[in-house]
Amino acid sequence: MDEFSAPGIGVLKEKLDYLKLDERERRRFDKHMDYARSEWGMIEDARQEGLEEGLAKGRKEGVAEGREEARKTLVKSLYDNGVAIETIAVSVGVSEPTIHRLLFDPMQSSET
């Protein structure tokens, strides 16, 4: 059968090989295939779970970054409009040193 190359011929060859097995060999083969399917199922489930956890973590981090960016924008806007740093700190709910970092530190780190 190796000389044939029609589509699906490989599947037919595998089926024929399976049918040539005696009952004991078929049971062993079926057991092996069940195990392999089970393993692949567990791997797929773990992959899906990891993907979902990663997406959830990414969303959470994205929301946190968005809030921080909004905070920086608000602080800068208030400061540019002449609002005192003490007032900005109270209004935004962060310390004055954090306001200074948001306004004057190029890295713009802040407390949360």
Image (cartoon, rainbow, N blue to C red):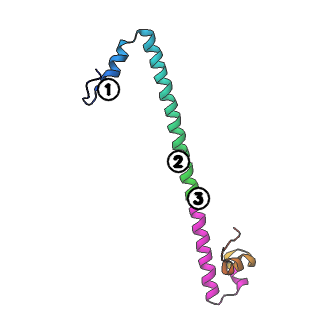
- The quadrant where residue 58 appears: bottom right
The residue type indicated by label 3 comes to Lys
> Sequence-wise, which precedes: disc 3 or disc 1?
1
Q: Is residue 12 above or below residue 92?
A: above
The residue that mark 1 highlights is 10
| Amino acid type, callout 2 | Leu
Q: Nearer the viewer, mark 3 or mark 1?
A: 1
Mark number, residue 60: 3
Identity of the residue drawn at 58% across and 54% down = 57
Q: Nearer the viewer, mark 2 or mark 3?
A: 2
Separation of residues labelled 2 and 1 (CA atoms) = 34 Å
Give how far apart the Cα atoms at labels 3 and 1 are: 48 Å
Where is residue 51? Give x, y as percent: 53, 47
**Bounds of the magenta span?**
59-88
Left or right for 53, reference 85: left
Task: Please indicate whether residue 28 sits to the left or right of residue 95 in the image.
Answer: left
Position of residue 102 measured from the top left corner of the image (x, y, whole percent): 67, 77
* SS for callout 1: helix
Q: Is residue 10 left or right of residue 46?
A: left
Q: Are there few (<14), some (14-19), or many (20+) residues within 10 Å of tag 3?
A: few
Cβ atoms under marks 2 and 3 closer than 8 Å: no
Does 34 appear in magenta? no
Report whether residue 78 is seen.
yes
Provide residue 34's location: percent of width, then percent of height: 47, 23
